[in-house]
Image (spheres, rainbow, N blue to C red):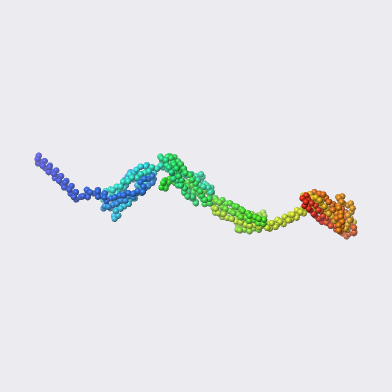
Amino acid sequence: MKIGRVLDFRTKFVACSMISFFLLLSTVFFPSAVLGDDSAAQTLNISLVSQKDALLPGECTKYTATVQNLGSQQRIDFSIEGKKLSWITLGDAYYDFTANPFKDVIFYICPPIGTPSGTYNFAFNARSRIDNYTASKPFALYVIDRPYLEIRDVTTSKDIYKLGESIDFSVNVRNLGLSDVKNVMLIVGITGADAPDKQRLQIPVIESDRGNSASGKFDFDRYSARGNYVITASIVDDIGDVLYTKSKTVNMEEKSELKQETAVKSDMLSREVTIKGANTGNKRDTIILQSSGMSYLALYSFAKQPDLIEDAGGMKTFSWRCDLGPGEACTVSYRVEYWLLVVTIIAALGIVYVVYNIVEQPEIKKKVIKVHEREHTVHITIRNRSRKPLHEVHVVDVVPEIVSVVPNSFSPSIKPAMKGKKGGSELVWTFAKLEPQEERVITYRIRPLVMLMGNVRLPKAKIYAVDSRGNKYRAESAVMVD
């Protein structure tokens, strides 16, 4: 029994001595194994900088992790820990350090739309491949709550607008979130020919699960606006990022509007005509400027010769052709002289006046009828050709000395006043009134005092009268012999 106990004791002693010996050797020859963690911690340093620490869902932020490697480790692996790794975009997974002990590692975190608000924790890790030591830099990202907005539609009062009209619009926004939204900013732009600038609109508040709208209009230059236009409305956040966009297409009609204006300056002998054509539309077109005048008794002079002259029915038509773009105009002019016409008119008026006076004058005719060699009958016919009655009508006839008047041969029985006159006797019949178109015949007989060869030649008979206005008339007869 004693021998066994002694052996057991010796065995335990030897075993303990060997363990103590090996522990002593490990302390002397392998100090790095004991101090390895502290040494590695001193050779890998991480600093982290971010653009912002709070985001709205749908936004992104940039991080820059600067890794300093002061140790002998060459290849360092980079990684990020956290529950939302799908949000992360990491540029470099590892880096081989050589002469430069610093490395900037860039990565992005983008919480998607619909992410609940709250704090999300992450850690950036740098791990040495030699000893698997990992240096870590924890950081947090706060996601801000944002109600979800969308543009339901962009509306206009009509799809096709007339020339010169403004395009009005309304942007209808819906809040699909659980909280009210204030000061919703909208940017509304329009694209197309000569489109105006964008407009910035604001909706003061949109309640949760409600809608609201903002309205405006775009004004255009009348001559340059034409064709299709696309209205684009966007919801933007405080920094100008676009959150939602919707568009609508409208049309501005394209047509020409041609107008012609004519101005005339005239005096007694001439006329100056100015014709202006204008295109007040937004489409190029051709206008035909026209003017007309008399074909005769007029002299024309043109600043620009007409493209076409037509002559029909005693009138001339002048035509000029102008090709006009939007907002363009053209002007032509000519001068016409009427002095030939005036002279003709004056001559015609003179003729009319003469004819009128002839027509208005009373008519008197004298005719001598031979009864036989010793006696002749004198017929004097008077007629009022005027439309007015004549007063104080005097018919005067002269009987030469070589003949004598047969007594009581007067018809009608009105006896004329007789008075001597050089070379013969003067007979005067007086009538108080001669109605319009009234005709009277005066006859008397004469006898030659000597034998005459051929017919008796008597002087002309005369008539004198006045009308109701005091105008005097006088006429002489021709003498006809039968």
Query: Image check: 145 left or right of 421?
Result: left
Is residue 276 among what the camera can see? yes
Front-most of residues 321 and 41: 41
- Farthest-out residue, bottom: 453
Q: Quadrant of the N terminus?
A: top left
Q: Provide residue 79's location: percent of width, then percent of height.
A: 31, 48
Q: Quadrant of the C terminus?
A: bottom right
Residue at (38%, 44%) from the top-left corner? Answer: 56
User: Up-down: is 208 above or below 472?
Assistant: above
- Farthest-out residue, left: 2
Q: Provide residue 429's location: percent of width, then percent of height.
A: 84, 52
Q: Provide residue 370's location: percent of width, then percent of height.
A: 87, 55
Q: Provide residue 403's location: percent of width, then percent of height.
A: 88, 57
How many numbered discs, if any?
Answer: 0
Is residue 233 among what the camera can see? no
Front-most of residues 280 and 413: 413
Residue at (59%, 54%) from the top-left corner? Answer: 276
